[in-house]
Image (tube, rainbow, N blue to C red):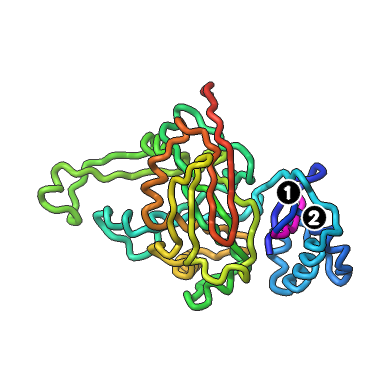
Amino acid sequence: MRVCTLYEGGREVVALVPEDGNPVQLLDAWCAANLKESACPESMLDLIEQGRGMKPLLEKAFEQACSGTLPEIEEPHWCPPLVRPSKVVGVMMNDATEIERAKIKPEGPLFFLKAPSTLLGHGKTVLIRPSYGRTHPSAQLAVIIGRKSKDVSESKALDVVFGYSVMNDVTSLGLATKDTLHLLAGGEELTQAEAGSAQVHFASHARSKNTDTFGPFGPWIVTADEVADPNNLSVKIWMGEEACTEDQTSDFMYSVEEVISKLSRSMTLEPGDVIQMGMPGMGSQAAKAIDFQDRLGPTSIEIEKIGTLTNPIALIVGEL
């Protein structure tokens, strides 16, 4: 089923989204299903934290939402499905092409943190400035953790997943270049010919990936039972009506299970945490060729079985 967070009546509310219809507030569906034995979750995080015991109740509420008898929200104002997760963790270079170009190959997935303050709902505007330089979209499968987890084995990794969503990891290559330190290097890892002239690059992505509005997320979460294999989904980027990239999550260098397992060995995963899986296959190279400075979109990320996330792009001419 599809669950989302909307801004309705001056507050954030949880809603259910039928396959062919507008969202219905969870509270309305909850009352219609006569689920008096349990309090209706007041937020997406509350829903997730209540765990597996919530699933049969949620299914009964979803039946009511699909019945066509409840009031629908015809012009929804979409929030990120999780407005304030404890953390958003991104996977770097999750495709073989990127890894091949590295002088030193990593032993497993590499991670970075994306600030929850970047998160932006479906239909909301990504804001960029000329000083950001080349700024591009990045299509990401988002994995939402369902329960507190530590040291999870790969064989059990999908058991801790609540569901899946779509993220656009907007990235400013211009800011990344400004925030890169270049040092002459001469280390044992370099050949003798390289040692005298090669440069080592220390890049900070604190701004290039964490600037406000750089985290479009949604429109909803599809519960894990609806996605049999997250490692076998098509992923597309659209600019307006033009399809710019098409890849498959089967082209991930590191599977969803491997990423969850490795990450959980370093940090405790909390309910509602979000892992964005990186761009699969050649999509990362094609995405970098898109520049929001020249193409103001809208930009859309489409992932099979999950949905399409669309956001307008606006250029702010005045600088702070």
Pointer 1 local density, CA inside 10 Å: few below 14, some 14–19, many at least 20: many
Frontmost residue, 295 versus 36? 295
Relative image position of residue 222 (x, y in whole percent): 63, 62
Q: Please, is residue 236 above or below residue 252 in the view?
A: above
Q: Determine whether, in the image, residue 187 is placed left or right of residue 107.
A: left
Residue plotted at (33% across, 54% down): 98
Residue plotted at (28% across, 60% down): 105
Mark 1–mark 2 distance (CA, rounded to whole Å): 9 Å
The residue under label 1 is 6
- Examine the rendering and report whether any part of residue 209 can be seen: no
What are the residue bounds of the magenta stretch?
A: 13-19
Label 2 SS: strand
Frontmost residue, 101 versus 17? 17
Relative image position of residue 38 (x, y in whole percent): 84, 69
Q: Let me know if residue 149 is in the magenta part.
A: no
Residue plotted at (43% across, 49% down): 245
Label 1 SS: strand
The image quarter containing residue 247 is bottom left
Of the 4 image quadrants, the one containing the N terminus is bottom right
Pointer 2 local density, CA inside 10 Å: few below 14, some 14–19, many at least 20: many
Frontmost residue, 70 versus 118? 70
The residue under label 2 is 25
Asked whether disc 1 touches disc 2, contact meaning CB atoms under 8 Å apart, the reply is: yes
Q: Earlier in the sequence, mark 1 or mark 2?
A: 1
